[in-house]
Amino acid sequence: MTLISARSRQRGLGLVEMLVALSITAALLTAAAVAIDASLKAYSVNQTQADTLHRARIALHRISTLIRTGSDHQPVSSDTKDAFAQGQTVTDSGIELIDPQGNVLQFRFDSDHQRLLFVDNGQTYTLLKNVVRFQLRMTPSRSAISIKTGGGFDRLSRATLLLTLRPDIPVGHIDSNESEQSWTLSTSVTPRIGE
């Protein structure tokens, strides 16, 4: 009896037991790898979305600050310029103004390339990418001098900006819902009055 129990104690792991242990380990490692990959992709998507939203907020802040401190505001489209000068509230895809230093600035939407452009004295820069829509609703008013002299509408009373954009998420990191996701930000600004 002692001879049999001594032999069974010396016996090692069998081939079937080894294969079962290896397959369980492989399944656990595969599940862990899939979970880590999904976590890294989700982190990448969240980072991209946060970065896109942050850039959009900075762009809107910059535009609204320049509208607030600038002068001689007008739409960029010729048909809306005429309507604005006649006192009509207009909606346009851009605005032109003069900043406090006397530079002619323009913000406009490039729908073909889905970009928001910033033009500073003829030099064009891309302010924001992946823009689906950019529009400004501009309400004109008359300055005190224009009212006294019987002139036309020469001042911007209020501008409401609307910016819609989508995040630039890498292919393979998104599902069908995230690829169609977009955000709309808006703000309203009144220029400072200075005669």
Image (cartoon, rainbow, N blue to C red):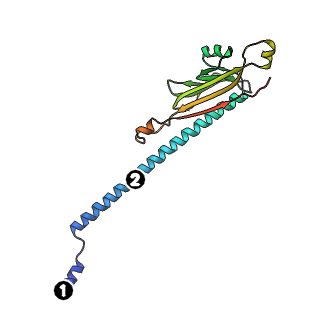
| CA distance for labels 1 and 2 | 50 Å
> Residue 98, position in %: x, y?
71, 23
Look at label 1 and name its amino acid.
Answer: Leu
Outermost residue on the top side: it is 150
Picture quarter with the C terminus = top right
Determine which residue is flagged by label 1.
Answer: 3
> In this rendering, would 1 be left or right of 66?
left
Q: Quadrant of residue 99?
A: top right
Query: For numbered disc 2, what is the local secondary structure?
Result: helix
Residue 124 visible in this rendered orientation of the protein: no
> Residue 23, position in %: x, y?
28, 60
Q: Quadrant of residue 153?
A: top right
Q: Earlier in the sequence, mark 1 or mark 2?
A: 1
Q: Residue at x 45, y 35 (%)?
A: 180
Q: Quadrant of residue 193?
A: top right
Q: Residue at x 22, y 70 (%)?
A: 14
> In this rendering, would 35 be left or right of 117?
left
> In this rendering, would 36 be left or right of 99?
left
CB under 8 Å between callouts 1 and 2?
no
For label 2, the crowd category at 10 Å Cα-Cα, with few meaning under 14, some 14 to 19 and many 20 or more, is few
Disc marking residue 35: 2
